[in-house]
């Protein structure tokens, strides 16, 4: 139910907040925030070439929508009132589907960071599938952890986590599970294209012959397809 507040002399019913990374402290620019008309359904799997199209309809349609600004802030105007109103917050394949417990009419309804932060794990929403090659000089997997992703989302490529670690002269285990060599990732394009994001840490040294031309070609093809 959308209430016409002009007839009551009040302001529009609105919902506002700040979009954060999973850690709840890093504000994010450019997130799509909307109240859907219908369930948006599951996200597509595999590599996608996602081009910005402001005219494209959002999954499930949108009753009200906004994009977070440089400070991560957003305001949804003229929203429905009532209980358990659905809310979608999304950047790429990082998506939280939340329920707003109560929206009161003809006032702004600010939301807490617990509702407007991207999910830490699959119990809170959708995460992109990420491959990380560990390195001796870089530890890019630690950056993902600092963003607030739960530890159990970090696994080897046989695990069920959203972040798969590979050995490239860095860590060779996650917990007690051994990591597959990064060459098994770079050398298999079908495996590469199953990931939304691939992060290659600096290995700290050159290993002669480790990266074949076929592996380099695979990485280029992956980037060309939107990875």
Image (spheres, rainbow, N blue to C red):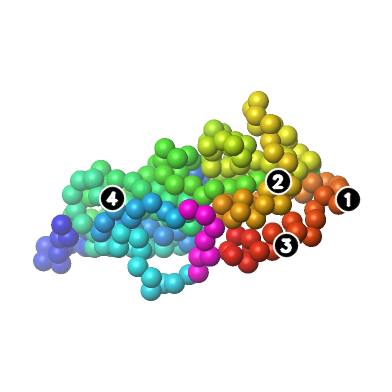
The answer to whether the residues at label 1 and label 3 have Cβ atoms under 8 Å apart is: no
- Give the labeled residue for mark 2: 184
**Is 9 placed above or below 131 here?**
below
Magenta region: which residues?
A: 45-51
CA separation, marks 4 and 3?
43 Å
The residue that appears at 62% across and 47% down in the rendered structure is 131
Q: In which quarter of the image is the C terminus?
A: bottom right
Q: Looking at the image, which is closer to me, 81 or 134? A: 134
The one of 212 and 35 positioned closer to us in this rendering: 212
Q: Tag 1's secondary structure?
A: loop
Residue 217: which numbered mark, if any? 3
Would residue 168 be seen by someone viewing this image from the given angle? yes
Foreground mark, 1 or 4, reads 1
Give the mark nearer the N terminus: 4 vs 3: 4
At 72% from the left and 62% from the top, the residue drawn is 217
Taking the image as shown, residue 28 lies to the left or right of residue 190, namely left
Give the mark nearer the N terminus: 2 vs 4: 4
Q: How far apart are marks 2 and 4 (CA)?
A: 41 Å
């Amino acid at each position: 139910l959308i209430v016409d507040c002009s007839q009551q002399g009040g302001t529009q019913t609105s919902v506002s907040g700040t979009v954060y990374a999973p850690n709840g402290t890093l504000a994010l620019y450019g997130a799509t925030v909307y109240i859907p008309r219908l369930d948006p359904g599951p996200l597509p799997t595999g590599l996608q070439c996602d081009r910005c199209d402001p005219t494209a309809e959002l999954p499930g349609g949108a009753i009200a929508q906004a994009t977070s600004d440089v400070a991560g802030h957003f305001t949804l105007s003229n929203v429905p009132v009532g209980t358990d109103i659905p809310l979608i917050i999304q950047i790429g394949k990082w998506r939280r589907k939340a329920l707003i417990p109560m929206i009161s009419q003809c006032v702004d309804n600010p939301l807490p960071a617990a509702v407007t932060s991207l999910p830490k794990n699959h119990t809170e929403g959708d995460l992109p599938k990420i491959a990380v090659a560990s390195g001796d000089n870089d530890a890019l997997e630690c950056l993902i952890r600092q963003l607030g992703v739960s530890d159990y989302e970090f696994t080897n490529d046989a695990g069920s986590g959203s972040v798969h670690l590979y050995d490239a002269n860095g860590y060779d285990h996650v917990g007690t599970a051994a990591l597959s060599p990064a060459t098994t990732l770079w050398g298999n394009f079908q495996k590469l294209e199953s990931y939304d994001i691939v992060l290659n840490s600096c290995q700290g040294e050159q290993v002669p012959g480790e990266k074949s031309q076929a592996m380099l070609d695979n990485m280029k093809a992956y980037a060309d397809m939107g990875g």
